[in-house]
Amino acid sequence: MLKLTSRELTDFFVGTLLGDSYIYRNAFQCKQISKDLINFKFNIINSHIPDCHPKIMEYEAYIDKKGVHHQKYYQLSTKPHPYFRKLREEFYPEGTKIIPEKYMRELSPLGYAMWYADDGTTILVGININRSAKNRRVQFCTDGFSIEEVQKISKVISAQYGTTSLVIRNKTMRRIQINTYDAQKFLIDIAPYFIKYFPSLLYKIDMGYRNESLDKRRYVMLEYKNMYLEISTHPLFIDRLKDR
């Protein structure tokens, strides 16, 4: 398991709190359908804050009274701990989760990997004659944060990786989108964590380039091509373009 510095551990928690995790009554909580991701979070917490006694509960898929199908999921929870109390005070000053001003800064690849694993996605549209996606978008689902917060964190990502834009969801919601070319640099940085620790989510770093598209160096970086060739041979890789 990774041995993190204090800064890396902070980035780990910042990334996952920007995503699906939350803190309730000074205890860390997270629900997810990805078993390897929840296990990764458990192992990091257990090895760095062992006295918070983390545990994982497994819940089977079910259909509710309205006929809605709910997937099997896992819940990670800890006991209250001073480390989480401090994070709660920063991220929930008024009860609603925010992005604290002090964390409007560049994150390490681990921090971004945790955030993207939870709330990031590549949107692949159509298939062209080369069996490649016709269009693709790389986004962070930031619907739960204010427009001002999203604008600020978008500028941080832009300074670190390249051009970003905001996708309008409605009057109060925006999503961060990374320019298609610049997104390759971002995905290359976070890929090692997906490959080694939560490969069930490898589909999230697939931009849908296939065959001839991978060889057109005009817009596909050699580093990205090599990364795709590596992830596409992994037994847990889900090819979303297959049989479309």
Image (spheres, rainbow, N blue to C red):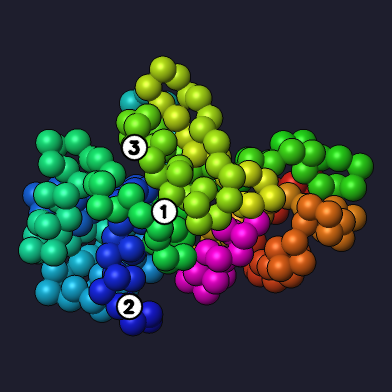
Q: Are marks 1 and 2 in contact (CB under 8 Å)?
A: no
Residue 38 is situated, as x and y percent measured from the top left of the image, at: 37, 61
Residue 216: quadrant of the picture: bottom right
Q: Residue at x 33, y 63 (%)?
A: 11
Residue at the far front: name it: 159
User: In the image, what residue type sits under mark 2?
Assistant: Leu
Quick one: quadrant of the N terminus?
A: bottom left
Q: Residue at x 29, y 60 (%)?
A: 13
Mark 2, residue position: 4
Ranked by sequence position, the earlier of labels 3 and 1 is 1
Residue 209 is situated, as x and y percent measured from the top left of the image, at: 77, 52
Nearer to us in this view, 36 or 142:
142
Q: CA distance from mark 2 to mark 3?
A: 27 Å
Local secondary structure at mark 3? helix
Residue 193 drawn in magenta: yes
Q: Are marks 2 and 3 in contact (CB under 8 Å)?
A: no
* Residue density around tag 1, few if under 14, some if 14–19, many if 20 or more, within 10 Å: many
Asked whether residue 223 is in view, the answer is yes
Local secondary structure at mark 2? loop
Mark 3, residue position: 149
Q: Nearer the viewer, mark 3 or mark 1?
A: 3
Residue 53 drawn in magenta: no
- Range drawn in magenta: 184-197
Q: Which mark is residue 41?
A: none
Residue 234 is situated, as x and y percent measured from the top left of the image, at: 66, 69
Nearer to us in this view, 75 or 88:
88
Is residue 214 found left or right of 228 in the rendered image?
A: right
Mark 1, residue position: 115
User: In the image, what residue type sits under mark 1?
Assistant: Trp
Q: Residue at x 50, y 56 (%)?
A: 160
